[in-house]
């Protein structure tokens, strides 16, 4: 009975069939990543029972740092930023995650316990990774479309940062769209998993909703900070990446 969840993979197989039939070129990536997700979550299930027993802050910080490093390399594989772009990814994700996570701790909304800091940190880092890849990918597209304007601004004496003003603005806006859509539809169309999980576990509805609001607002903050750090750290490498 515990393996019944594997039947849900039928939905992935439908997607794989369509992608293969239409020759969209991402069916192999979907197949590998869907299997990878299963393996990673299986390992996580066994590791969490050990991780939740850790008491040393240094050990917890080491786990969070490893998660950020892994996120940075994942982001680099997606956006392929020139010249060791994973360093840009690491600092963008690290700075945004650090600010948001330790703000939650300072406000006493999250405690430095493994069963809180690791899941919350994972959500922060995961959302930061998504925003980083959206932001950098949008920057690359904007540069291709506005390269003449950028060159003219620089030729007239403006700095490269000035020339990237509109590129950065459009990129941050694009990265914020998913969370804005979620905020608009949450509770009406989108029913968050944390709220459902807490309700199933027997929590009071107001308690479940309150905790979910903390998560939602946390994601807003991490999206903004990641977007800001990404455009400021990456803009010098974007030109080389696009035209290399």
Image: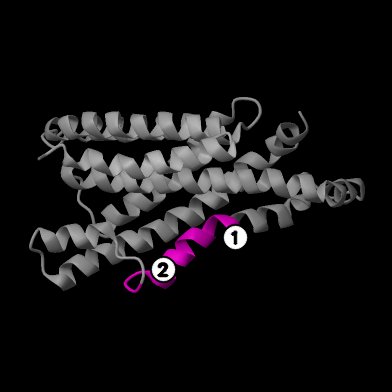
Asked if residue 157 lies left or right of residue 18, the reply is right
- The alpha-carbon separation of the residues under discs 2 and 1 comes to 15 Å
- Secondary structure beneath dot 1 equals helix
- For the magenta stretch, what is the residue range? 173-188
Instruction: Please state the total of marks drawn on the protein image.
Output: 2
Which percent across, then down, holds residue 237?
A: 69, 35
Secondary structure, magenta segment, majority class: helix
Asked if residue 228 lies left or right of residue 42, the reply is right
Task: Confirm whether the magenta stretch covers residue 112.
Answer: no
Which percent across, then down, holds residue 190?
A: 35, 66
- Secondary structure beneath dot 2 equals helix
- In this rendering, the answer to whether 56 lies above or below 145 is above
The answer to whether one can see residue 108 in this image is: no
Q: Earlier in the sequence, mark 2 or mark 1?
A: 1
Residue 60 sits in which quadrant? top left
Q: Viewer-proximal residue, 179 or 166?
A: 179
Which residue sits furthest left?
202
Which percent across, then down, holds residue 137?
A: 62, 44
Residue 208 sits in which quadrant? bottom left
- In this rendering, the answer to whether 189 lies above or below 48 is below
- Residue at x 41% of width, y 68% of height: 183
Q: Which residue is mark 1?
A: 173
- Residue at x 22% of width, y 63% of height: 195
Which percent across, then down, holds residue 147?
A: 82, 46
| In contact (CB < 8 Å): disc 2 and disc 1 | no
Task: Confirm whether the magenta stretch covers residue 187.
Answer: yes
| Number of other residues with Cα within 10 Å of mark 2, as a class: few under 14, some 14 to 19, many 20 or more | some
Q: Which residue is mark 2?
A: 183
- Residue at x 45% of width, y 35% of height: 30
Q: Viewer-proximal residue, 230 or 182?
A: 182
Q: How is the image coloured?
A: one colour
């Amino acid at each position: 009975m515990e393996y019944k969840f594997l039947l849900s993979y039928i939905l992935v197989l439908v997607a794989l069939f369509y992608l293969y039939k239409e020759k969209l070129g991402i069916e192999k990536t979907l197949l590998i990543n869907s299997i990878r997700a299963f393996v990673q979550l299986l390992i996580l299930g066994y590791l969490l029972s050990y991780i939740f027993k850790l008491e040393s802050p240094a050990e917890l910080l080491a786990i969070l740092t490893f998660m950020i490093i892994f996120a940075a390399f994942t982001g680099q594989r997606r956006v392929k930023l020139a010249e060791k772009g994973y360093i840009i990814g690491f600092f963008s994700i690290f700075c945004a995650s650090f600010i948001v996570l330790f703000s939650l701790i300072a406000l006493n909304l999250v405690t430095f316990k493994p069963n809180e800091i690791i899941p919350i940190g994972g959500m922060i880092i995961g959302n930061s990774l998504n925003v980083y890849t959206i932001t950098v990918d949008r920057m690359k597209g904007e540069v291709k479309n506005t390269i003449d304007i950028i060159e003219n601004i620089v030729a007239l004496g403006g700095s490269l940062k000035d020339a990237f003003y509109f590129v950065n603005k459009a990129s941050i806006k694009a990265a914020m769209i998913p969370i804005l859509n979620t905020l608009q539809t949450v509770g009406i169309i989108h029913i968050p998993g944390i709220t459902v999980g807490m309700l199933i576990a027997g929590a009071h509805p107001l308690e479940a909703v309150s905790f979910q609001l903390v998560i939602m607002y946390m994601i807003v903050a991490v999206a903004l900070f990641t977007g800001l750090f990404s455009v400021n750290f990456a803009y010098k490498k974007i030109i080389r990446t696009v035209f290399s």
